[in-house]
Image (cartoon, rainbow, N blue to C red):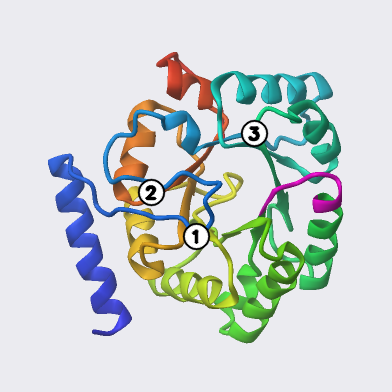
Amino acid sequence: MDDKELIEKITREVMAKLSEGKPAAAAADKKPETPPATGMVPSDIASYIDHTLLKAEATAEQIDKLCDEAAAYHFASVCVNTSWTARCAKRLRGTGVKVAVVVGFPLGAMSGRSKGFEARHAIEEGAGEIDMVINIGALKSGDLKTVEEDIKHVVRVCGRNVVLKVIIETALLTDEEKVTACRIAKDAGADFVKTSTGFSSAGAKAEDVALMRRVVGPKMGVKAAGGVRSFQDAVAMINAGANRLGTSSGVAIVTGSASSAAY
C-alpha cells in the first residue's frame, strides 16, 4: 500500500470511528513520565495536558499563575518559551509537574545547531521536555536529509532523559508530507510527533492525529496542540490517538468552565 492509499484508508477509518464515538487508536508512550492513552475517555485527563502559555506578551505574574494551576490540577507539564525555563523550574520544584519548552519556535526556520544550543541551555536551566519545530521549508523542498539532521541536533542534546516532541505544523503540509515528517521524526529518535505550534493557520484536527498515530505506531507519543479548548475537544483528540494535549485551556477542560484561550 502506497502513502496515498494509506492516507485514504486512515481517513475513512477515523471519521467512521469518531462518528460512532469509538476510539481510533490506543497509544503507549516510549518514556514512562508521560501517561499512555487508553483509547477511552481517561479519568485522569489532567495528566495528558501540557498547560501552555507562549504569547509574546506573557508576564512573570501570568507565568507564575500557569505554574500554580499546573501544580494544583496535576497537569503533565507547563509549556513555555525558553526565557521562562529557570523561573518555572524553581516554582514547580517538588510538584511532579515538568517544564516543557519550545525550541525553534514558531517558524522552525533557524539552523539545527541553533535549535540544539537553545535546547541545551533550557535543559541546563531545568527543562525536562523539548517541543521543537521542524524545518518546514526543507521538508516542502524535498530536502529530507536537512529535516532529519535538524531533528538529530536536538535528539543528541536531549539524550535518554529529556522528552523530545517534534512539531510538524500540519496546517502547512499535505497529507503525504505529514506522513514523511512523522517517519523522519521517528527514525531520528524523537519521542513524540506534535501537530501544531498554535501560531499558524490552523491547529490540531482529529484526522491528522489519527494519521500521525497510524504512521508512528503505538509506542511513540502523539501530541495534539492548537485549538484544543474544551473537554469535548480533548476527548476527540485522545480518541483519535493523542496521548498528550497542548492547550492554554487546561483549567477549563478539567473543570468544564468556559474559556476563550487562543492556543
Q: Secondary structure at mark 3?
A: loop
Q: Position of residue 219 (x, y in %)?
A: 42, 63
Comes first in the chain, label 1 or label 3: 1
Say what amino acid the circle numbered 1 marks.
Lys
Residue 61 is one of the magenta-drawn residues: no
**Mark 1 residue crowding within 10 angstroms, few (<14) / some (14–19) / many (20+):** some
| Above or below, 74 relative to 164 | above
Residue 108 vs residue 169: left or right? Answer: right
Q: Which residues are magenta?
A: 123-130
Q: Secondary structure at mark 2?
A: loop
**Mark 2 residue crowding within 10 angstroms, few (<14) / some (14–19) / many (20+):** many
Q: Which residue is mark 3?
A: 97
Residue 192 vs residue 219: left or right? Answer: right
Comes first in the chain, label 1 or label 2: 1
Q: State the quadrant of the N terminus.
A: bottom left
Q: State the quadrant of the C terminus.
A: top right
Q: Position of residue 190 (x, y in %)?
A: 58, 66
Residue 144 disc label: none
Residue 138 vs residue 250: left or right? Answer: right
Query: Residue at the spot x=59%, y=76% of the render?
Result: 188
Q: Inspect this view and state whether residue 127 appears.
A: yes
Task: Give the foreground label among 1 and 2.
Answer: 1
| Above or below, 97 relative to 5 | above
Residue 30 disc label: 1
Q: Which residue is mark 2?
A: 205
Say what amino acid the circle numbered 2 marks.
Lys
Residue 222 vs residue 109: left or right? Answer: left
| Above or below, 155 relative to 204 | below
Q: CA distance from mark 3 to mark 2?
A: 26 Å
Query: Dots 3 and 2: beta carbons under 8 Å?
Result: no
Q: Secondary structure at mark 1?
A: loop
Comes first in the chain, label 3 or label 2: 3
